[in-house]
Image (spheres, rainbow, N blue to C red):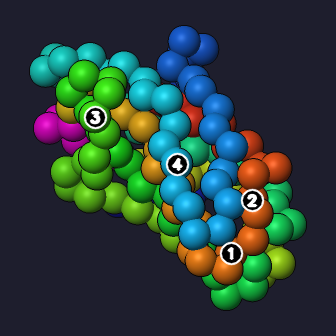
Amino acid sequence: MATTFNSRNLIDAQAQVTRTLPAAAASNTSTGIYIGGDGPHKERLKLKVELPTNSVLVATKTLTIALWDSADNSSFAAASPAQSFVITGATGFAAQDIYFEIAQTTRDYVAARFTVESGGGDNTATTATISVVS
């Protein structure tokens, strides 16, 4: 389940990437972050997506953020169980942190997938920070 909340999490500086948001009717995926193989306690990790204030997302249009994973850091797909978080524009949106829980079954690399609805405006001036926290 994706959530927003204020928390104090440990962040590994090597496990942090940035990604610009896509324009309307487009999607993009962040660089993958390695979370390890089948070791224990993977479920204690979270993928954190930090979004700054955005003044572009068109009112009533959506930005969907989803947790994706990959075995090889090349072919990404929606993680299982599927998790996503939807932001509805209101002439942009407020800054927020979104957390995705990482399941034990999540593959070796995780990434954030961003999709802006058709007509949602050009959001490419907004950069998200994606990290793995414990």
Question: Is 15 situated left or right of 76 in this image?
Answer: right
- What's the magenta region? 101-106
Is the Cβ of the residue at disc 4 closer than 8 Å to that at disc 3? no
Structural distance between the alpha carbons of marks 1 and 3:
27 Å
User: Mark 1 is on which residue type?
Assistant: Gly
Structural distance between the alpha carbons of marks 2 and 4:
12 Å
120 or 17: nearer the eye? 120
**Residue placed under numbered mark 4 in the picture:** 28
43 or 27: nearer the eye? 27
**Residue placed under numbered mark 2 in the picture:** 123
Structural distance between the alpha carbons of marks 3 and 2:
25 Å
Question: Are there few (<14), some (14-19), or many (20+) residues within 10 Å of tag 3?
Answer: few
User: Mark 3 is on which residue type?
Assistant: Ser
Where residue 75 is drawn, which disc sits there?
3
Q: Position of residue 6 (x, y in %)?
A: 63, 50
Tell me: residue 27, above or below residue 103: below
User: Mark 4 is on which residue type?
Assistant: Asn
Structural distance between the alpha carbons of marks 4 and 3:
13 Å
Question: Are there few (<14), some (14-19), or many (20+) residues within 10 Å of tag 2?
Answer: many
Q: Report the predominant secondary structure element of the magenta stretch.
A: loop
Tell me: residue 49, above or below residue 54: above
Q: Is residue 63 visible?
A: no
Is the Cβ of the residue at disc 2 closer than 8 Å to that at disc 1? yes
**Residue placed under numbered mark 1 in the picture:** 120
Please tell me whether mark 4 sits on a helix, a strand or a loop: strand
Q: Is residue 39 visible?
A: yes
